[in-house]
Amino acid sequence: MLERGTIVAQQIQSEYGKISIREEVIAKIAGVAAMECYGLVGMAPRNVQEELTDLLRRENLERGVDVKFNEDSISIRLYIVVEYGVKISEVARNVQERVRYHVENMLGLTVDRIDVKVQSVRVTEVTRK
């Protein structure tokens, strides 16, 4: 793992040299993969600072994604908002499978674990009637 100031990256040694993958890249791929899952309405902010940042910019695909680097693998924590009426355990399992598949296949990294934290349930106007 490479760490300079606030830049954190995973380093991979290949036959041609070193490859550094920034935390933001992993988080963005995980966020996009999660958003493809049925029943997921969006990603929830991890903290108050992230909530304020979201007010200032629109496209933030890594919102609600924490990446932790281990010795030879990574762990991902996702904070999600699900749609009312869906089976939450199924949505969470689908998110875990899809994120693992995309991160491992696109980046060649080993994903040790994926924790899903359901922060909220969104109720639409149609559901309320």
Image: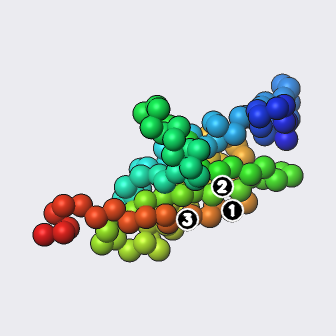
Kind of residue at badge 3: Lys
The answer to whether residue 102 shows anywhere in this view is: no
Q: Position of residue 65 (x, y in %)?
A: 59, 50
Number of marks drawn: 3
Q: Secondary structure at mark 3?
A: strand
Circle on res. 117: 3
Residue that numbered label 2 is attached to? 76
**Of circles 3 and 2, which is in front?**
3
For the residues labelled 3 and 2, the Cα–Cα distance comes to: 11 Å
* Mark 1 or 2, nearer chain start: 2
Kind of residue at badge 2: Ile
Q: Residue at x 57, y 57 (%)?
A: 78
Residue that numbered label 1 is attached to? 113
Q: Secondary structure at mark 1?
A: strand
Badge 1 vs badge 2, beta-carbon distance below 8 Å: yes
In the image, taking residue 85 as reference, residue 119 lies left or right, namely right
For the residues labelled 1 and 2, the Cα–Cα distance comes to: 6 Å
Badge 3 vs badge 2, beta-carbon distance below 8 Å: no
